[in-house]
Image (cartoon, rainbow, N blue to C red):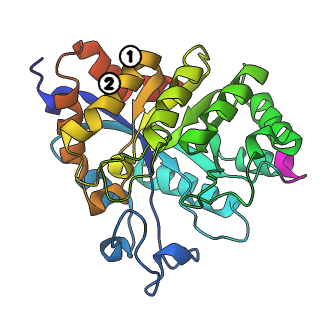
Amino acid sequence: MTVDLSQVEIVDAHHHLWELGRFPYLWLAPNAPPARFGDHTSIKRNYLPAEYRADFAGFNLRGSVHVQANCGANDPVAETKWLQSLSQRTGTPNAIVAEVDLCRTDAPQLIARHAASPLLRGVRAMVAWDADGRWRFADRPGILLDPAFRRGTQALIECNLSLDLVVVPSQLTEVADLASAMPDLRIVINHLGQPESGADESGQAGNEDIWYRGIEKLKPHENVFIKASGLWIIDKSWRPDRLRPFVTHVLATFGAHRVMYGSNLPVEKVNTPAAVQIRILAEILADFPIDDLQKILSDTAKEFYRI
């Protein structure tokens, strides 16, 4: 497949913006240590729509989805309100995925307050927890099975909102359970489910096998989607030979209509700029129909997030 990538529409399903003086952003503080994805000194500064759009120069960026950026605000609704006003001024972003602790007793009320912003499309739950302690965004295992969490997700359904999930491969079976119990809940797994290549020095033994089995468990659940984003977890340099088995497996398992590209900017550009990401994805998908590339780069996200 030979394609002029400058003519392919792109709807970025996953990016961040921030204004450091507005919210605490503790993970971006001057003295914050290097992150798992590398030394992020270069992004410890404001990242706003003009720079974001410049990072897609030469490409046909038609829309974007802002995913909550761990801003540290006492009231996470403040981030959503700021993003809504930012979009009204600049045209970016075109959809918002907010921060909500779905286990809170007042989660339905918090969701409703977020939803006062017209661009709200969903919330993100960072519930990753593995037994070895490599990923502990959650304070305990099994949150996806918690009745309190399920009550929060029911509120999402009632508001026609989706659920972004940050999980590790060992939790994919729990995602399948959630999808089965709540078939009306639209779920999208961030960062390909965070598989870690055993060939990499940061790899976790057995992670790949667990990931493959988990992805297969999700195949029949048409309400589960997945983002080709945050692929630094597999390989920081986005080498095609390292990414190809994972990307092609989710495409073969889910179909292009359930896979969407997310730049993860500006985090991902610490290692791999958006232009390189897009070219590498096109290379990996060279033997697939052009329609699949268009769905992954644009159409799936456009439909899922109602852009």
- Where residue 201 appears, as percent x and y from the top left, is 32, 59
Q: Which mark is residue 252?
A: 1
Circle 2 SS class: helix
Q: In the rendered structure, does residue 106 fall within the stretch colored magenta?
A: yes
Are discs 2 and 1 less than 8 Å apart at CB?
A: yes
Circle 1 SS class: helix
Q: Which mark is residue 248?
A: 2
Q: Residue at x 43, y 85 (%)?
A: 30
- Where residue 109 appears, as percent x and y from the top left, is 85, 49
Q: Residues within 10 Å of mark 1 (few under 14, many from 20)?
A: few
Please determine whether, in this image, residue 102 is positioned above or below residue 218.
below
Looking at the rendered structure, the kind of residue marked 2 is: Thr
Q: Which residues are magenta?
A: 104-109
- Where residue 119 appears, as percent x and y from the top left, is 58, 41
Please determine whether, in this image, residue 6 is positioned above or below residue 207.
above
* Left or right, residue 255 beside residue 224: left
Please determine whether, in this image, residue 24 is positioned above or below residue 7.
below
Residue 74 visible here: yes
Q: Residue at x 19, y 46 (%)?
A: 275
Q: CA distance from mark 2 to mark 1?
A: 6 Å
Looking at the rendered structure, the kind of residue marked 1 is: Ala
- Where residue 103 appears, as percent x and y from the top left, is 82, 50
Between 123 and 168, the one lying in front of the other is 168
Q: Locate the N terminus and report the quarter of the image it occupies.
A: top left
Residue 94 visible here: no
* Left or right, residue 203 beside residue 96: left
Can you tell which quarter of the image residue 284 is in?
top left
Between 220 and 95, the one lying in front of the other is 220
Q: Residue at x 58, y 61 (%)?
A: 82
Q: Residues within 10 Å of mark 2 (few under 14, many from 20)?
A: some
Q: In the rendered structure, does residue 68 fall within the stretch colored magenta?
A: no
